[in-house]
Amino acid sequence: MVLLVSLQNRERMSMNKRVAILQSSYIPWKGYFDIINMADEFILLDDVQFTKRDWRNRNKIKTDKGTQWLTIPVETKSKYEQLICDTIIANNTWPVTHWSTIKHNYSKAPYFHTYKDLFEDLFGQCRELKRLSDINYLFLSEICKTLGITTQITWSMDYDSSGCKTDRLVNLCTAAGADVYLSGPSAKVYIDPEHFSNEGIVVEYMDYSNYPPYTQQFGVFDHYISIIDLIFNEDDGAPRYMKSFS
C-alpha cells in the first residue's frame, strides 16, 4: 500500500497508531521530516550497526561549486561492528568547520539570518557531545520544533525487542502499540508484509515522488540535500514544499 495522502489531510476513522522507524541521520533531507510528521511515534533505530559513507554522520548542502558533503568525523578503527548509538565523535572541531561552511554558502539566502542564532547555538552545543546519536537527535528535535512537527520521538533502545530485519520492526511496532507501520519505499526489498499482518499491523510505504521545487540558490535544483536549504530559503513557508503539510 502506498501512502498518497498526508496525516494532516486524512480523515482518521479510528484511533490507529502509526509508527515509523528509521536510523538517525545528520541534518537529513525534507523527506525524513515528512515521515516523522506523518507518524504518531517516530522510533530512532540506533542500536544497529553503524555503516560508513552513509547518512548517519553526513549530509549535503548546495554551494556555488555544486553540492558539498558535511561529514562528522567518527571513530571507526577496529570498530567494525559498532552500533550507531555507540559511535563516538573523533574530535570536537568539526562543528566550527561545518558552521563556517554553512555560513559561507547560505549567508545570502533570504532567511539565513532568521535562523542564524538557532543553528549557531546548535553547532556550539555539539562541541560538548561525544556520541553521534546525541548529535543527530539534537538537530532532529530542534528542526522538528522549527517546522511545527510534534511527533513523539523515541529510541529503539526504549523497547524490549529482538530479531533481525522484518522481525525486529514487527516487534518494535508491537511494543509501541502500532496499528500501522509507515516505511520508507526502499524497504520494500526486504520487508515481509505478512509478518506485520499476522500481528494486526498494516504496512504503508512513504511516497517521495513529485516534491514541488522551491526557490534555491546555485544552479540546478536539487531535492536531495539537507533540510536547512529549504528552511534558509523559505522560512515558515517551508511546509508548503513538503508532503505532510499539504
Image (cartoon, rainbow, N blue to C red):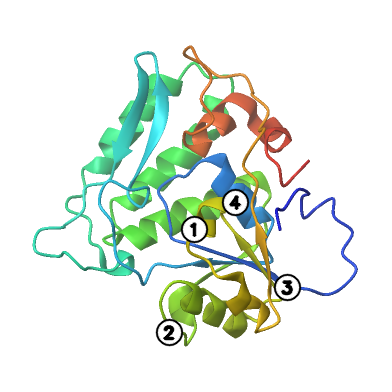
Q: Front-most of 164 and 96?
A: 164
Residue 137 is left or right of residue 195, and the answer is left
- Classify mark 2: helix, strand or loop: loop
**Could you tell which of marks 4 and 2 lies nearer the N-terminus?**
4
Q: Which mark is residue 17?
A: 3
Q: Residues within 10 Å of mark 2 (few under 14, many from 20)?
A: few
* Res. 77 in view: yes
Q: Amino acid at mark 4?
A: Cys
Residue identifier under label 4: 144
Give the residue drawn at x 75%, y 48%: 4
Give the residue drawn at x 47%, y 13%: 218
- Classify mark 3: helix, strand or loop: loop
Residue identifier under label 2: 162
Q: Front-most of 20 and 190?
A: 190
Q: Amino acid at mark 1?
A: Val
Point out residue 9 in the picture as x, y percentages from the top left corner. 84, 50
Closest to the camera, between mark 1 and mark 4, is: 1
* Cα–Cα span, label 3 and label 1: 24 Å
Residue identifier under label 1: 189
- Classify mark 4: helix, strand or loop: helix
